[in-house]
Amino acid sequence: MTVQQPDGIHHIAIMSANMKEQLTFFTQVMGFPLVGLFDMHGVPGGKHAFLRMADDSFFSVVELAGIAEIPSTIGITHAGTGAGKCAAGTMQHVAFRVPDEAGLIAMQNRIREAGVPAIGPIGHGFCKSIYFAGPEGLTLEVSYAVSEVDSAHWVDPAMLAECGISGEEAQAMLNPPPCTATGPVPQPAYDASKPQLAYPVETLKAILSTPDAAITMQGSYNEPPVAA
């Protein structure tokens, strides 16, 4: 089957200055088992952890030297609440999923039992949520789906207009075009008008001019840190 869109989240990664604090919270408070903790591939001195959320979905923590010296500021680096502001392109909050109302209340009980306040439940029509904080200023949520999100009822024409989205543009968003490629698509050349990873420009151009097979060979780390 041809893949036309991602089918879920493989992992969400958050930056940390204190790996132990984050792992303690997400294993003991949230109940995610630790399944990986190893040197971050290709990043000397980096630590990378994986905690299982579901069979093929993980929560990840990255710790790098010097992170503690970077200031955290509510309204810039962190939103602080589900309604708070932070800089464009940064993570406002993370919402974890449970299957139903009973699961939501069970998580609220688990979080509160650990001494962490959890606000809610609050209904949003198609979902219901609780809100709480995690270490290092994280804004967190747990939600369950009350109903399908029907675009006929949940895409507001007034909001489309406020966002400057025309009727034609809205239709393209509601019905994304399929991928038409029938073979490998060559790497595009560097174009400053397109989103780019934050490497130095000349380094990025060199990466983009390197064949995919060479990138795979040079950059892959396939063996676990503990031998079988």
Image (cartoon, helix red, strand yellow):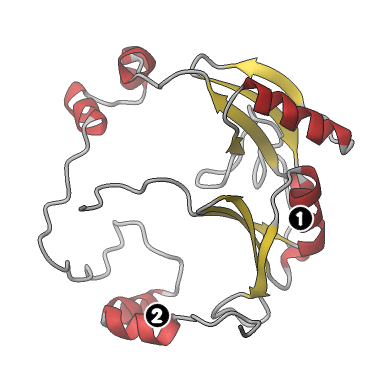
Which of the two residues, 146 or 136, is positioned nearer the viewer here?
146
Disc 1 target residue: 22
In the image, residue 130 sits, relative to residue 191, either above or below, namely above
**Res 47 seen here:** no
Q: Residue at x 57, y 45 (%)?
A: 91
Mark identifier at residue 203 = 2
**Res 151 seen here:** yes
The three-letter code of the residue at mark 1 reads Gln
Q: Residue at x 71, y 36 (%)?
A: 80
* Mark 1 or mark 2, earlier in chain: 1
Label 1: element kind: helix
- In the rendered image, residue 94, in percent from the top left (x then y), is placed at 60, 40
Asked if residue 74 lies left or right of residue 146, the reply is right
Alpha-carbon neighbours of circle 1 within 10 Å: few (<14), some, or many (≥20)? Answer: many
**In the rendered structure, are the residues bearing label 1 and label 2 in contact, judged by CB atoms less than 8 Å apart?**
no
In the image, residue 88 sits, relative to residue 1, either above or below, namely above
In the image, residue 191 sits, relative to residue 134, either above or below, namely below
- In the rendered image, residue 1, in percent from the top left (x then y), is placed at 21, 52
In the image, residue 201 sits, relative to residue 125, either above or below, namely below
